[in-house]
Image (cartoon, rainbow, N blue to C red):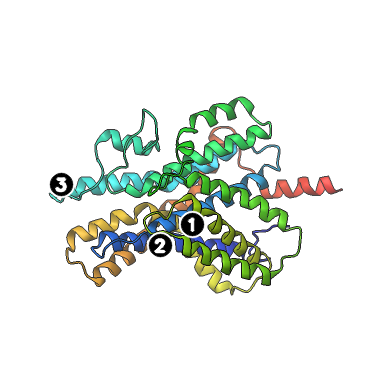
């Protein structure tokens, strides 16, 4: 059976490594771009990795937890809301505070609008949503449109998933209709844009069920290693800088990801200490994505010489502050989710234990 248990295989630590690498690609790439060293499109590739991981892991979550009849769109929505907003809300408030302080001291940073309407719109995930309520991204948070897109995808796909399973049919229809605008707008393929990201997310979502089906057969590690080399090389050759998010490049990216998962399902060779370190770096990746650009642009506004030292300092400081930010906010999302469930009269439950118990009962 497919498993993300780190005691059984290296898939979990590999996904953590990809998450950490994706965050660093975005952070270092933005430091390069805004630090006066030219232009790199590595941040876009980092976002692609985030969407692949997101689609795959949301499919796993829905498939695993929905095995319990008590798990539905409400529980899923609360967990996704807590996972995003526990870090996102403090990040937006921090970005707004930094903007106000910089203006107070007469320092202007060229960025997106910082008016109250845009601020409130970003708090409610309306940045660049293709409808009448849309606003631009706020201040130095230009990278956060992808967060809003993922947030809308979670509720749109989650609602459709539980609708197909016949749970909370009316509520699922309402939720799907409310959150359909943004995902469907990112289901096209406009050259030079990221408007195919929802297609990539869905491919990653579907890849989980492919991997799950393949898990019934013993993996041929040699074959999947060859598949990884061929598909990854093909993706790199196809990759067009400036048009990294083009739809035609997604199949090879997904196939290379599936190959990696298949390999790691069959092996367990990563030392525990290294796995622990990778997990630490991965656990603050979302916080790093949220606040790194604001930190870097503040540093660049005070340190005006475009030097390698400035770039390295910007990357290191962004990582350190993101780690602290994660300790203060992001890592508490489970508590936030449980508190919301309790407030709504839906006490927290151990879904893993319940699913296991149901499976055992069904087998007996």
The tally of labels here is: 3
Kindly indicate whether the residue at mark 1 contacts the one at mark 2 (C-beta within 8 angstroms). Answer: yes
Is the residue marked by circle 3 packed among few (<14), some (14-19), or many (20+) residues within 10 Å?
few
Q: Is 259 in front, or is 273?
A: 259
Which one is earlier in the sequence, the residue at label 2 or at label 3? 2
**Which residue is most to the left?**
106
Q: Position of residue 310 (x, y in %)?
A: 24, 68
Check disc 2 and report the residue beneath it.
25
Q: Depth check: 7 or 199 in front?
A: 199
Label 2 environment density (alpha carbons within 10 Å; few <14, some 14–19, many ≥20): many
At label 1, counting other C-alpha atoms closer than 10 Å, the crowd grade (few under 14, some 14-19, many 20 or more) is: many
Q: Any mark on residue 104, and which?
A: 3
Q: Earlier in the sequence, mark 1 or mark 3?
A: 1
User: Which label's residue is closer to the chain start, 2 or 1?
Assistant: 2
Q: What residue lies at 38% left-to-right and 59% top-to-bottom?
A: 241
Residue at x 26% of width, y 44% of height: 112
Residue 128's quadrant in the figure? top left
Q: Quadrant of the N terminus?
A: bottom right
């Amino acid at each position: 059976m497919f498993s993300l248990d780190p005691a059984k295989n290296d898939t979990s630590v590999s996904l953590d490594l990809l998450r950490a690498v994706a965050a660093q690609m975005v952070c270092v790439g933005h430091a390069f771009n805004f630090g006066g060293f030219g232009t790199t499109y590595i941040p876009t590739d980092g976002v692609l990795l985030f969407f692949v991981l997101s689609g795959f892991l949301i499919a796993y979550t829905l498939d695993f937890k929905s095995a319990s009849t008590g798990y539905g769109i409400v529980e899923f929505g609360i967990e996704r809301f807590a996972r995003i907003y526990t870090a996102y809300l403090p990040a937006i408030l921090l970005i707004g505070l930094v903007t106000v302080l910089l203006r107070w001291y007469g320092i202007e940073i060229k960025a997106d609008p910082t008016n109250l309407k845009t601020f409130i719109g970003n708090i409610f995930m309306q940045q660049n949503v293709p409808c009448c309520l849309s606003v631009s991204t706020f201040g130095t948070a230009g990278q956060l449109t992808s967060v809003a897109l993922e947030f809308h995808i979670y509720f749109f796909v989650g609602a459709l998933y539980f609708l197909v399973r016949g749970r909370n049919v009316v509520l699922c229809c309402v939720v799907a209709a409310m959150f359909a605008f943004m995902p469907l707008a990112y289901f096209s393929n406009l050259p030079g844009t990221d408007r195919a990201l929802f297609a990539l997310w869905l491919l990653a979502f579907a890849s989980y069920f492919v991997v799950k089906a393949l898990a019934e057969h013993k993996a041929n590690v040699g074959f999947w290693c060859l598949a990884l080399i061929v598909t990854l090389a093909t993706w790199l050759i196809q990759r067009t800088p400036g048009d990294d998010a083009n739809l035609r490049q997604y199949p090879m990216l997904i196939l290379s990801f599936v190959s990696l998962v298949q390999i790691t399902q069959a092996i367990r060779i990563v030392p525990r200490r290294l796995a622990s370190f990778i997990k630490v770096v991965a656990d603050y990746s979302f916080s790093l994505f949220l606040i790194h650009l604001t930190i870097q642009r503040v540093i660049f506004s005070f340190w005006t010489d475009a030097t390698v030292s400035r770039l390295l300092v910007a990357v290191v400081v962004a990582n350190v502050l993101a780690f602290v930010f994660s300790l203060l906010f992001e890592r508490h999302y489970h508590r936030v989710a449980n508190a919301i469930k309790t407030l709504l009269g839906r006490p927290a439950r151990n879904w893993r234990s319940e699913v296991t118990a149901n499976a055992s009962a069904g087998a007996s």
